[in-house]
Image: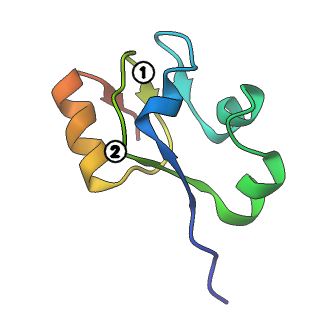
Amino acid sequence: VRRPKPFGINFKVLNLLPEGTVVTEEVLVKYNIVDKDLVKVHGVKILGGGELLRKLTIKVPMSKSAAKKFEELGTKKAS
């Protein structure tokens, strides 16, 4: 059984989160960025679209372009 493609969230949307936030699926649901049921079915993936203005720690999957931008910003990717 194949899992559906993850729901993509662009950089610019993450600017809704406070500086220093640890970004998890639960945090994205809490701030109404993504629906809880959508996360359960699809999961999420951070995409490199737009500009990120905050330093965040990311604990969800990212595209290669997003990962590169995060490194350039000095933002942390937590494992």
Q: Is residue 41 left or right of residue 64?
A: right
Please state which amino acid type lies under the numbered disc 1.
Answer: Leu
Residue at 16% x, 29% y is: 72
In terms of image quadrants, where is residue 25?
top right
- The percent coordinates of residue 18 (x first, y second) are 55, 11
Q: Is residue 51 above or below residue 43?
A: above
Q: Is residue 53 above or below residue 11?
A: above
Please state which amino acid type lies under the numbered disc 2.
Answer: Gly
Q: Residue furthest front?
A: 50
Q: Residues within 10 Å of mark 2 (few under 14, many from 20)?
A: many
Q: Residue furthest right?
A: 37
- The percent coordinates of residue 8 (x first, y second) are 52, 54
| Picture quarter with the N terminus | bottom right
Q: Is residue 23 left or right of residue 34?
A: left
Number of numbered labels in the structure image:
2
Q: Residue furthest left?
A: 72
Q: Is residue 3 left or right of residue 40?
A: left
Residue at 49% x, 38% y is: 59
Regarding mark 1 in the picture, which secondary structure is present there?
Answer: loop
Please tell me which of labels 2 and 1 falls first in the chain.
2
Regarding mark 2 in the picture, which secondary structure is present there?
Answer: loop
Please tell me whether mark 2 or mark 1 is closer to you in this view. 2
Residue at 27% x, 33% y is: 70
Residue at 57% x, 20% y is: 16
Q: Nearer the viewer, residue 11 or 64?
A: 11
Q: Residue furthest bottom?
A: 1
- The residue labelled by disc 2 is 48
- The percent coordinates of residue 60 (x first, y second) are 50, 45
Q: Residues within 10 Å of mark 1 (few under 14, many from 20)?
A: many
**Is the image coloured rainbow, by chain, by secondary structure, or in one colour?**
rainbow
- The residue labelled by disc 1 is 56
Q: Label 2, label 1: how many angstroms apart (C-alpha)? A: 14 Å
